[in-house]
Amino acid sequence: MLCTAGFALIGLGVAAVVPLVFAAAGNRGTTPGEGVAGVATITYMSALIAPAVTGWVAGATSYPVAFAVITCVVALMTVLAGAMRPPAPAATADAASLREVGA
């Protein structure tokens, strides 16, 4: 029962984050399609590679070490998530000249 509750919480977290990631990707690429395609490719590749890498690490060391590696990767992603923040709009020369004219 506890395992089912854990999977439900993971599902709720993914359901909230994935649309935000795809929206941010659509705003970051040269075209929206390029950004979404890049994120989709990384998502599918990680879904294929992550279980194999986790199993390899667990086989080479132990399950606690494998889950500690996953925890460290998630913590690193959390710290670096700010890099996906869109840049603040810069004041253009036109906006500066409009302020001077209105003053």
Image (cartoon, grey):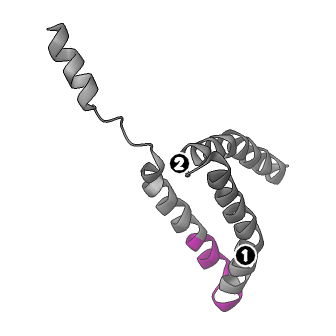
Give the label, 2 or 1, closer to the camera.
2
Identify the residue at image location x=77%, y=72%.
Answer: 48
Q: Residue 43, percent across and down?
A: 70, 61
Write down the region rendered in magenta: 59-69
| Magenta stretch holds residue 10 | no
Q: Residue 28 got which mark? A: 2
Q: Residue 51, percent across and down?
A: 75, 74
Q: Which residue is mark 1?
A: 49
Crowd around label 2: few <14 · some 14–19 · many ≥20 (10 Å): some
- Give the mark nearest the N terminus, 2 or 1: 2
Q: Residue 102 got which mark? A: none
At mark 2, the secondary structure is: helix
Looking at the rendered image, the quarter that the C terminus falls into is top left
Count of residue discs: 2
Identify the residue at image location x=63%, y=46%.
Answer: 32
Against 84, residue 96 (above or below) is: above
- Kindly identify the amino acid type of the residue bearing the numbered disc 1: Ile
- Kindly identify the amino acid type of the residue bearing the numbered disc 2: Arg
| Magenta stretch holds residue 65 | yes
Q: Residue furthest top?
A: 102
